[in-house]
Image (cartoon, rainbow, N blue to C red):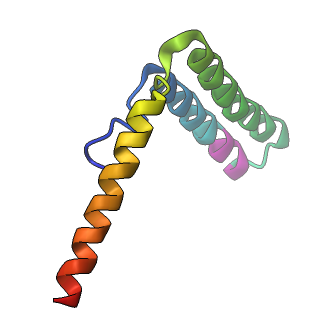
């Protein structure tokens, strides 16, 4: 997986950062025994997900792979799997 850029997009970074801030807010208010503040933090977490999805829809997420790229990756995996099977039977 190191060869992919899974999650390395502005949409992912923004959504996760906002959700993390919401997590921190909810955590502080949970310790402070303030239900209103806790639920405000939970709302910020949800807002992070919504903003991340909106940014992805706006084109700031990972681009979809073409059908040819998916097929080529599948073929390469199949060939690698057959090579590994052949080596273990030898």
User: Which is more toward the observer, 38 or 64?
Assistant: 64
Q: For residue 87, what is the image quadrant?
A: bottom left
Which secondary structure is most common in the magenta stretch? helix
Question: Is residue 68 part of the magenta span, yes or no?
Answer: no
Residue furthest to the top in view is 58
- In the visual, does 79 lie left or right of 69? left
Residue furthest to the right in view is 36
User: Which is more toward the observer, 31 or 74?
Assistant: 74
- Please provide percent x and percent y for residue 25: 63, 36
- In the visual, does 71 lie left or right of 58? left
Vertical relation: 41 (above or below) 87:
above
- Please provide percent x and percent y for residue 23: 61, 41
Q: Which residues are magenta?
A: 26-31
Query: Which residue is at 42% across, 25% downward?
Result: 9
Vertical relation: 53 (above or below) 88:
above
- Please provide percent x and percent y for residue 69: 38, 34
Question: Is residue 30 part of the magenta span, yes or no?
Answer: yes
User: Which is more toward the observer, 78 or 63?
Assistant: 78
- Please provide percent x and percent y for residue 4: 32, 40
Q: For residue 85, what is the image quadrant?
A: bottom left
């Amino acid at each position: 997986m190191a060869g992919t850029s899974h999650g390395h997009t502005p949409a992912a970074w923004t959504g996760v950062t906002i959700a993390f801030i919401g997590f921190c807010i909810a955590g502080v208010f949970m310790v402070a025994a303030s239900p209103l503040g806790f639920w405000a933090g939970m709302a910020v977490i949800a807002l992070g997900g919504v903003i991340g999805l909106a940014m992805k829809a706006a084109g700031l997420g990972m681009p979809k792979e073409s059908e040819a790229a998916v097929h080529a990756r599948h073929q390469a995996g199949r060939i690698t799997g057959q090579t590994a099977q052949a080596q273990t039977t030898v």
